[in-house]
Amino acid sequence: SKIKEKRAVLWRLLILALPEWQYLSGGFSFLLIAAATTTWLPKLTGEVIDDIVIEKNEDLIRGSLTRLAVVSLASAVASGIRGTCFLIIMVKMNVRLRDKVYSAILCQEMDFFDATKTGDLSSRLSADCNKMSD
């Protein structure tokens, strides 16, 4: 039952993020690139250590360090782009959600505004949307 609820929430979240499908696909693509390059870092670090300790050949050391630097840079760039894509999605979803909630509040009958305090409405709008974005 809890698994079904979590899946339902995940699907609703994905549906909310669907208008940003370009950022979503980019974020997941760079997530895969970052994961793949990060996986290679220990192996490349081991090669550098082997070349320094065992081979003691400057050309091998230079080549190993270059490979390590390139993969590290690729990992850092991919992680940064991934984070940026997901941050943009979160901000756009938050704006869209606030707009929907605000529009729903504006469509209420006048009696609703007589019965509900303005501070309660603005507090609820702010707190609920912030909670959703977190």
Image: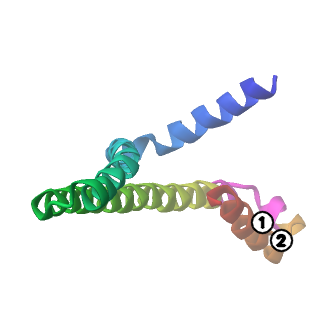
- Image coords of residue 120 (percent x, y): 83, 71
Image position, residue 70 (x, y; %)? 21, 59
Residue that carries the numbered disc 1 in the rendered image: 124
Q: Is mark 2 on a helix, strand or loop?
A: helix
Instruction: Tell me the CA gap for discs 1 and 2.
Output: 6 Å
Q: What residue type is labelled 2?
A: Asp
Instruction: Quadrant for the N terminus, please.
Output: top right
Q: Is residue 88 left or right of residue 133?
A: left
Q: Where is residue 16 in the image (x, y as percent from the top left)?
A: 52, 43
In-front residue for pair 56/49: 56
State the residue position of label 2: 120
Magenta highlight: main SS: helix
- Verify whether residue 64 appears in magenta: no
Question: In front: 40, or 119?
Answer: 40
Q: In this view, does 99 lie to the left or right of 113?
A: left
- Please report contact status of discs 1 and 2: CB closer than 8 Å, yes or no: yes
Magenta segment boundaries in residue numbering: 104-113
The reply to whether the magenta stretch includes residue 111 is: yes
Total marks shown come to: 2
Report crowding for label 1: few under 14, some 14 to 19, many 20 or more residues within 10 A (C-alpha).
few
Colour scheme of the picture: rainbow
Residue 100, horizontal then vertical, whole percent = 58, 54
